[in-house]
Amino acid sequence: MPLLLAACGPADPETKARPAMWLAEDADTRIYILGSMHALPRGTDWDDGAVGAAIEAADELVMELSPAELDAAAKTFRELAPRNTPLAIDARLTGKALMGYRALEASGRRLNGDGFDDWAVMVLIGQRVAQNAALSPNEGVEAHLTERFNAADKPITGLERAREQLMLFETLDPATQRMLLIRAAEEADTATRDVLALTAAWGRGDVAALEKVVNEDIDTVPAARKAIITDRNHRWAAWAARRMERPGTVLMAVGAGHLVGAEGVPALLEAAGIEVRRVQ
């Protein structure tokens, strides 16, 4: 799960990244669908080539969260994350998971997980992994796209609200939350390496490798896959299908893990009869 939460990793700054992008189009509408990484290291070069052309051509940008909702996410997390009654991490994790959590906590400021719900501790683990890999959301795809579209005075909207997004975790049943936390803590010792592998695949546009990494990360927790990946993919594909009914050019940027496989957004649109092709 740290892979999904960090959703990113450092690319070699000497190598141009070529993330996968698709185009759904009809006679008067084009929707470019770009797989994003929410945080990246300084200097990652990814926004030229076909992606740069799509940025210039698009009339509007659609992301998972609008800039205002991105700004609201931290406050919403602080509202939803605390437990009604603190529960020691030692009472939730044992063995390798507890060792992984403690080692990760020792790499920086204390995570203070005792006071947070299981899902929120998992988020904190993902954030620490990203920090340890020298990643920043200020360098991520969404931040850069927001800057570009604001500078061009083009509208930016979101597919979800911050509270809606975090409630996907908050409303998972307790057993699923605990399973996700245990997996995140058990994988803490290899998380940076795994994030590097994920980002290398993203930079190559290697959707088969991306699908493999994402599936290995979440397939052992089916309830989480449904809530966090599959159901959202179907909602976003339905949004794109409706948007095809109006003319214009849109750049749609969502997490790269949502675009791969038979239930990724491009495949769902194609199954609905919409012409979709890979353009990068």
Image (cartoon, rainbow, N blue to C red):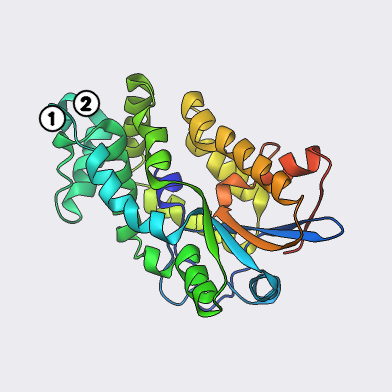
Q: Is residue 270 above or below residue 27?
A: above
Q: Residue at x 66, y 76 (%)?
A: 56
- Residue tagged 2: 92
- The image quadrant that residue 60 belongs to is bottom right
- The image quadrant that residue 180 belongs to is top left
The crowding category of the residue bearing disc 1, from other C-alpha atoms within 10 Å (few below 14, some 14 to 19, many at least 20), is: few
Residues 82 and 196: in front is 82
Taking 160 as reference, is 21 left or right? right
Give coordinates of residue 139: x percent, y percent: 42, 69
Q: Is residue 104 above or below residue 144?
A: above
As drawn, which residue projects farthest toward the right?
Answer: 27
Instruction: For the C terminus, give its image quadrant.
Output: bottom right
Give coordinates of residue 102: x percent, y percent: 19, 42
Q: Which mark is residue 195?
A: none
The crowding category of the residue bearing disc 2, from other C-alpha atoms within 10 Å (few below 14, some 14 to 19, many at least 20), is: some
Residues 144 and 118: in front is 144
Tag 1: amino acid = Ala
- Residue tagged 1: 88
Q: Residue at x 44, y 53 (%)?
A: 195
- Dot 2: what SS? loop
Taking 72 as reference, is 107 left or right? left
Residues 71 and 14: in front is 71
Asked whether disc 1 touches disc 2, contact meaning CB atoms under 8 Å apart, the reply is yes
Give coordinates of residue 227: x percent, y percent: 50, 31
Tag 2: amino acid = Arg
